[in-house]
Image: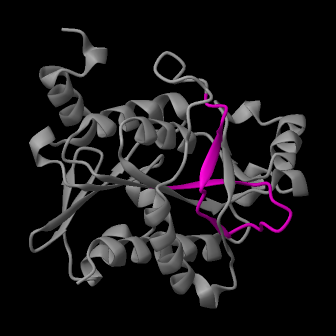
Amino acid sequence: MVYGEMGSEALRWATQFDFGLDPESMPSQVVITPLKVEDCFKDFQAIITRKGLTIEKVGNGFLVWKECKQALFCEGGIGASCFADASYILCHLKNVKEIIFVGTGGGLGEHVESADVHIPSSCIRLDKVLEFILPLEAPANADHDLAEKLESLIENEVRDLGVKVHNGMHATVPFFLSETESLLRNLQKRGALSVDMELSVLYALANHYHKKAAGVIRIGDLPLKGLPAWESRSYKRELKDEVHKRILCAIVNYIFKP
């Protein structure tokens, strides 16, 4: 058995191991975060239940449904290498049509502030983990229609919080300590509004395997403005948690719209 070829047996094993479901049971829409779902979305289960949806723990995430409509909210792993595993599996599953990424990232744009939201239209690929599958120049773009729908819904949800929703270029680096000032300044000059360690992997694989994908980045630290990651954990903490709740509400409204 050549695992990397993702034949039926390997794909079944990998899907069950990573997501707790058989390939045939995977829903068409998946929401994935590098963190554990309940760490990304505070009060996740309470919000889902309050919206009249049914929830069941499966694997590293939750299957959520209402009547015949289902979606999987799951964990992808922190860092480009870990996240590539989950993304690669999802992109080989025939049932999966749309993948929505939700994560956090550093703000690079001049007008980007902590707790803002960025829905990247494209990524600069510095991830370094897909080179044996895709060259670094392979595109890493969001699905335009999906990103546009999410942007509209999220803008409506967070309008009263005073945070901005951005749409532009994003960059993904291979690991946290690769974020030197010279690299971040260069990315800023190239037009990147934010940076993380996962998203470009999903975009590149989704483009290659013809899946719809869009990412939602909640801005945490502002490294070029003097707000490092360890300070950003408490800076605007309540606002950031509320932004994540609103992002969840927007995504749920999109997936389970009447």
Query: What range of the chain is rendered magenta?
Result: 101-127
Q: How is the image coloured?
A: one colour
> The N terminus is located in which quarter?
top left
Residue 185 screen position, x and y as percent: 88, 44
* Residue under the point 68% across and 44% down: 171
Q: Is residue 22 visible?
A: no
Q: Is residue 213 left or right of residue 72?
A: right
* Residue under the point 61% across and 87% down: 159
Q: Nearer the viewer, residue 210 or 8?
A: 210
Which quadrant would residue 49 be assigned to in this image? bottom left
12 vs 39: above or below: above
Which quadrant would residue 172 be assigned to in this image? top right
Q: Is residue 197 left or right of residue 26?
A: right
Residue 95 screen position, x and y as percent: 19, 47
Q: Is residue 151 magenta?
A: no
Residue 10 screen position, x and y as percent: 19, 21
Residue 32 screen position, x and y as percent: 40, 51
> The C terminus is located in which quarter?
bottom left
Q: Is residue 112 magenta?
A: yes
* Residue under the point 41% across and 77% down: 249
Q: Is residue 133 visible?
A: yes
